[in-house]
Image (tube, rainbow, N blue to C red):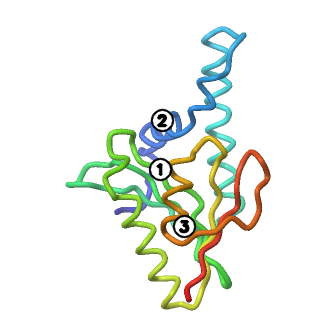
């Protein structure tokens, strides 16, 4: 992995598009308006992450030197927060995300911290992975679930 750089924005945008099937459901507007709306959503998400987690660790996931995803983690005083973990579609289901999460869990275990994250309602495969890795739902807001992992 390496730190995110400014020139990574087009790559990060492509990951954003690939991880948000809900944006494809937008209808009733022309393509230019839809594209503008999606770009605004992307900018808002990026700004929100930086505003809420200015000390966050924002990384590009590399495989054989090529970018395949992004991992954003905030290592707080009480909890490690997985802000975002996303992979290009063709790299999903290969165990990459699980290995990254296991690494964060091990780091949190050693530090005596919990790990928290959110998962969107439409992302059932990812939620199943989190549950398999020991995360439990602590709040279900309908559109997303807040999940937490605590070392034993």
Q: Which residue lies at the image location 67% right of the left edge and 35% below the top edge? A: 41
Label 3, label 2: how far apart the Cα atoms are: 20 Å
- Percent x, y of residue 50: 64, 57
Label 3, label 1: how far apart the Cα atoms are: 12 Å
Q: Residue furthest right?
A: 141
* 122 left or right, relative to 90: right
Q: Earlier in the sequence, mark 1 or mark 2?
A: 2
Give the position of the C terminus as an image quadrant: bottom right
Which element is circle 2 on? Answer: helix
Which element is circle 3 on? Answer: strand
- Percent x, y of residue 97: 41, 59
* 8 left or right, relative to 149: left
Which element is circle 1 on? Answer: strand
How packed mark 3 is, by other alpha carbons closer than 10 Å (few <14, some 14-19, many 20 or more), is many
Residue 55 lies in quadrant: bottom right
Q: Earlier in the sequence, mark 3 or mark 1?
A: 3
Q: Earlier in the sequence, mark 3 or mark 2?
A: 2
Residue bearing the label numbered 1: 86
Total labels: the figure holds 3
* 8 left or right, relative to 95: right
Q: Which residue lies at the image location 58% right of the left edge and 69% below the top edge? A: 135
Residue bearing the label numbered 2: 18
Residue bearing the label numbered 3: 73
Q: Nearer the viewer, residue 42 or 115?
A: 115
- Percent x, y of residue 28: 72, 10
Above or below: residue 68 compared with residue 39: below
How packed mark 1 is, by other alpha carbons closer than 10 Å (few <14, some 14-19, many 20 or more), is many
């Amino acid at each position: 992995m390496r730190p995110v750089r400014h020139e990574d924005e087009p790559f990060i945008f492509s990951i954003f598009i690939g991880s948000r099937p809900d944006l494809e459901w937008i209808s009733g507007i022309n393509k230019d308006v839809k594209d503008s709306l999606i770009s605004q959503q992307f900018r808002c998400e990026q700004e929100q992450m930086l505003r809420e987690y200015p000390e966050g660790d924002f990384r590009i996931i590399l495989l054989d030197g090529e970018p395949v995803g992004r991992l954003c983690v905030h290592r707080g005083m009480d909890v490690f927060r997985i802000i975002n973990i996303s992979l290009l579609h063709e790299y999903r289901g290969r165990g990459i995300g699980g290995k990254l999460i296991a690494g964060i869990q091990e780091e949190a275990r050693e530090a005596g911290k919990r790990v928290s994250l959110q998962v969107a309602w439409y992302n059932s495969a990812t939620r199943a992975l989190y549950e398999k890795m020991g995360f439990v739902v602590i709040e279900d807001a309908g559109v997303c679930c807040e999940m937490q992992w605590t070392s034993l």
